[in-house]
């Protein structure tokens, strides 16, 4: 660093020094409220309806995340089911389990179903955020998810609450 470097002359200003400088600037007429800005108003409290929509949106997003994980898991399983045929084409032979076309198609159908359910939940979140009506097949999707996720009582409660609140809308 150079001896006349301005960074060497820098120092930290304490809050007391800041208030002293501000009062001196006010005396000289150099200080205005617009420069520092007034304190912002408190955010408006959410109405119960807004809070409910926000919670419903968060629950729908969480369910969509679960579906996307299921899509990834099923896609990975499909990939592993199709892998032996791919290795045979490359000339390698390992004794892998063989899967029928029906088993592979079943996993493909499962992936397609999960994608359709995920799309329905995404549309429902967008509809809630834009204050529109939810998609018509949302209740059916929630019912399917409730059956599929019955091992998790907390999620079942959230889905049941969603169904009740969406039915009331």
Image (spheres, rainbow, N blue to C red):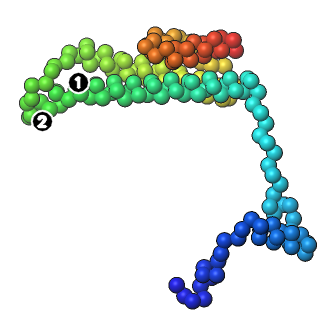
Q: Which mark is residue 90?
A: 2
Q: Relative to residue 63, is residue 36 drawn left or right? A: right
Residue at the image point whose x is 90% and y is 75% from the top: 28
Quarter of the image where one finds residue 104: top left
Q: Position of residue 80 (x, y in %)?
A: 24, 27
Q: Position of residue 152 (x, y in %)?
A: 46, 16
Quarter of the image where one finds residue 137: top right
Q: Which mark is residue 81?
A: 1
Which type of secondary structure does the marked residue at label 1 adopt?
A: helix
Residue at the image point whose x is 74% and y is 24% from the top: 48
Query: Quadrant where the C terminus lies?
Result: top right
Q: Relative to residue 66, is residue 103 drawn left or right? A: left
Q: Nearer the viewer, residue 92 or 36?
A: 36
For residue 7, above or below residue 46: below
Whether tag 2 and tag 1 are in contact, CB under 8 A, the answer is no
Q: Relative to residue 89, is residue 111 drawn left or right? A: right
Determine if residue 45 is in view.
yes
For residue 169, above or below residue 9: above
Residue occupying the far bottom of the picture: 3
Q: Position of residue 61 (x, y in %)?
A: 54, 28
The residue mark sitting in front, 2 or 1, is 1
Which type of secondary structure does the marked residue at label 2 adopt?
A: loop
Q: Which mark is residue 33?
A: none
3D distance between C-alphas at marks 2 and 1: 16 Å
Bin the neighbour count of mark 2 within 10 Å (Cα to Cα): few under 14, some 14-19, many 20 and up. Answer: few
Q: Nearer the viewer, residue 48 or 141?
A: 48
Residue at the image point whose x is 16% and y is 27% from the top: 85
Mark 1 or mark 2, which is nearer the start of the sequence?
A: 1
Bin the neighbour count of mark 1 within 10 Å (Cα to Cα): few under 14, some 14-19, many 20 and up. Answer: some
């Amino acid at each position: 660093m150079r001896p006349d470097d301005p960074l060497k002359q820098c120092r930290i200003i304490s809050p007391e020094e800041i208030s002293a400088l501000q009062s001196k600037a006010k005396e000289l007429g150099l200080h205005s409220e617009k420069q520092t800005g007034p304190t912002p108003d408190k955010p408006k409290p959410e109405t119960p309806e807004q809070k409910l929509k926000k919670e419903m949106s968060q629950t729908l997003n969480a369910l969509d995340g679960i579906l996307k994980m299921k899509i990834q898991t099923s896609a990975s399983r499909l990939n592993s089911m199709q892998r032996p045929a791919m290795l045979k084409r490359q000339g390698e032979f390992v004794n892998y389990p063989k899967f029928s076309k029906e088993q592979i198609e079943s996993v493909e159908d499962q992936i397609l179903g999960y994608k359709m359910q995920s799309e329905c939940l995404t549309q429902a979140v967008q509809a809630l955020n834009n204050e529109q009506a939810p998609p018509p097949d949302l209740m059916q999707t929630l019912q399917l998810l409730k059956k599929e996720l019955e091992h998790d009582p907390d999620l079942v409660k959230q889905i049941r609450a969603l169904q009740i609140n969406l039915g009331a809308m």
